[in-house]
Amino acid sequence: MNAAKHHPSAEPSGISWWFEDALQAEGGQVASAVLTGELRVDVAIVGGGFTGLWTALALKERSPTQTIALIESALCGSGASGSNGGKVHGYWASLQGMAESIGEDAALAVARAGTRAQDAIRAFATTPGRDVWWREAGNIRVSTASAQDKKIDGYTSMARRLGVPDTAVALTAEQVAARCRSPVFRGGVLFPEGANVHPARLARALRMAAIEAGVAVFENSPMIGLDRGTPNRVRTPQGQIIAREVVLATNAALAGEAEAKPHLSVFSSYAVMTEAAPARLQQMGWAGDEGIADLRMFLHYFRKTPDGRVLMGSGSGPIAYGGNTADPALTQDPASAARAERGLRRLLPIMADVAVTKAWGGAIDISADRLPFFRTIPGTRIHYGCGYSGHGVNATYVGGQCLAALVLDVKDEWSSLPLCTRSLPRFPPDPFRTLGARAIRWGILACEEAEENEQSGPMLARALAAVPRVFGLRIGTR
Ligand SMILES: Cc1cc2nc3c(=O)[nH]c(=O)nc-3n(C[C@H](O)[C@H](O)[C@H](O)COP(=O)(O)OP(=O)(O)OC[C@H]3O[C@@H](n4cnc5c(N)ncnc54)[C@H](O)[C@@H]3O)c2cc1C
């Protein structure tokens, strides 16, 4: 094992392998305008990640005459959208949790919206000329410890119960091994709706498509103030946008907005990328393009690239106090990067001596029921969307459609979704929220690590890990 307990081979930063590769693929020529002076438009969008960009495209498609400006504080795709695992799947794997929190019919409605999103992202990504590495072979959750085995039946029996058995198919250990061999893989469950993408190239392609559709895109133009009114005024260091409608698509930064704050907590996720090792992938028999994740609550997620690299992520990064997205622990925590690397060496031991070339972390916007929410701030024409809870590559398309419907004030298949209409559960206020979540995280991590060694966690850890279920919270619930 190469990674010492707290020291990854590569120091983590906030810049992903994907984003560097995407900028390189653009030839280092990143033509971006900075907002200067005053601009008057119908819609101002703040944030140039998937949410902001899909919203801009949805608006242009539905109402081509709307004038739209999008501002991004750095470069489009430099946030979570260009840093993630690139695993694209909707909500079929979330049926159980959704059925508990919003009911079975609503859960099915959200999962079907995810399928519409998957179709639309596929259509965008596979348009000739877009080299965004779209590969589609489903997503597997695999058990790597006996404590994880029982979860498999939960997925498949819920899918059967809701009349959609084909969305979650149990795999025996042999069937898992036929797709990817590892001595620690046991049985699993295949969710056929699942793809991989190069997330930063997708974000940059969306930026290009938005510009081509007539959206005025400004980068290195952070919003430094928002004066609510009719119209609203969005201020940047060198300019301002006067707009009837404003969309805040700033992801975890929304934890600082009064309306979203009670419903949003800021966690983090870390990933490592190996050097290309196609021969090792062949040795494992990992010939297809399945995305894979284990069945932990703080899961390891992994996928390969067309040139034979493996990305291994660990959704177990630190929790920011009070939702502070500037907390360096969200992007520079060596222990979390080391956890992702240990996951790589344990889950795919054939990769034991393959070098890790890059490690990075990023903020995750966790909602109290682990579902995103899209809303209009009452009494204003300011709309926002967040709460993807580490699962936003597919869901941000849904977000774009929901936010476009809210901007246009139309009741349709998107704005009628529970994502726009359900009453939102709240987190307890700080300091209880952050300190409680940190304690629970510690408890769950300790239990899950012990379970990987076929032991049970220490008593205190087990007690803390049980807290969310006792209080009916989905966060941290395994
Ligand atoms: C390490 C990691 C791995 C992940 N893996 C997966 C995965 O495999 N599959 C999956 O489905 N999801 C995954 N996610 C989650 C997914 O990436 C996000 O849910 C999704 O990208 C959110 O998109 P967004 O546009 O809302 O946010 P972002 O992409 O973060 O975009 C928000 C943008 O707003 C900008 N901004 C913030 N404040 C301001 C301001 N004041 N003015 C102007 N601009 C501002 C930011 O710079 C940023 O670019 C992962 C996330 C991380 C961090």
Image (tube, grey):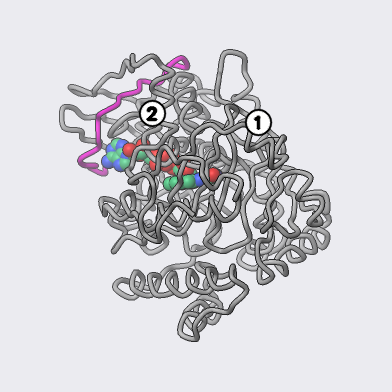
Q: Residue 375: give x, y in percent of width and height.
A: 45, 50
User: Marks 2 and 1: CB-CB under 8 Å?
Assistant: no
Q: Foreground: 270 or 435?
A: 270
On the picture, is 363 further left or further right than 132? left
Which residue sits at x=21%, y=29%? 240
Q: Which mark is residue 20?
A: 2
Q: Foreground: 387 or 383?
A: 387
Which residue sits at x=59%, y=41%? 303
Q: Is residue 231 above or below residue 444?
A: above
- Residue 230 visible in the current orientation: no
Q: CA distance from mark 2 to mark 1?
A: 21 Å
Which residue sits at x=57%, y=44%? 351
Q: Which mark is residue 408?
A: none
Q: Residue 206: give x, y in percent of width and height.
A: 48, 25
Q: Is residue 162 above or below residue 196?
A: below
Residue identifier under label 1:
135
Q: Which residues are magenta?
A: 211-229
Q: Secondary structure at mark 1?
A: strand
Could you say which quadrant of the image residue 285 lies in?
A: top right
On the picture, is 97 further left or further right than 201? right
Residue type marked 2: Glu
Q: Is residue 135 above or below residue 326?
A: above
Can you name the residue that lies furthest to the bottom here?
Answer: 459
Quadrant observed for ligand 1 in the rendered image: top left
